[in-house]
Amino acid sequence: MKNMTQTIGQLLNWDFETSDRLEIRDKNNNLIYFENSNGYWSKFEYDSQNRETYWETSRGYWAKWEYDSQGNEIYYESSSKT
């Protein structure tokens, strides 16, 4: 069986000619998915306090954050070497 990877826009048959971007938001209005007409996408995850905890792009970049109980960032890691 072939691995057929599609973007969410492709799965939804999103009409990028009518709307050049697709945005999906969670119940707290946090952006959890973005895709544009060029096929670039980003996805985001948040914790219960609406702090970003994960970010990934179609170009292979990613970042991860963790916070303590007071909301202070205690961990950060990314695919960037800088």
Image (spheres, grey):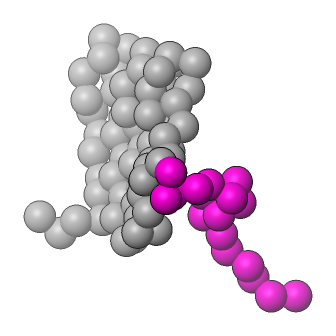
Q: Position of residue 27 (x, y in %)?
A: 58, 18
Name the quarter where the C terminus is drawn.
Answer: bottom left
Q: Residue furthest right?
A: 1
| Residue 55 falls left or right of residue 73 | right
Which residue is depicted at the point 47% across and 48% down?
19
- Work out whether residue 20 or residue 9 is closer to the camera in this orientation and state it: 20
42 is within the stretch colored magenta:
no
Q: Is residue 35 visible?
A: no
User: Magenta residues: mostly which secondary structure?
Assistant: loop
- In the rendered image, residue 1, in percent from the top left (x then y), is placed at 88, 88
Is residue 55 shown above or below 81?
above
Q: Is residue 43 above or below residue 72?
A: below
Residue with the most extreme bottom position: 2
Residue 38 appearing in the image = yes
Q: In the depicted view, which residue is nearer to us: 81 or 61?
A: 61
3 shown above or below 81: below
Tell me the residue at 62%/54% (across/down): 14
Q: Residue at x 30, y 17 (%)?
A: 71
Taking the spot 52% from the left edge, 30% from the top edge, the residue there is 25
Q: Position of residue 36 (x, y in %)?
A: 42, 57
* Image mark count: 0
Give percent across and percent down for residue 34: 45, 48
Was residue 2 drawn as part of the magenta stretch in this picture?
yes
Q: Which residues are magenta?
A: 1-18
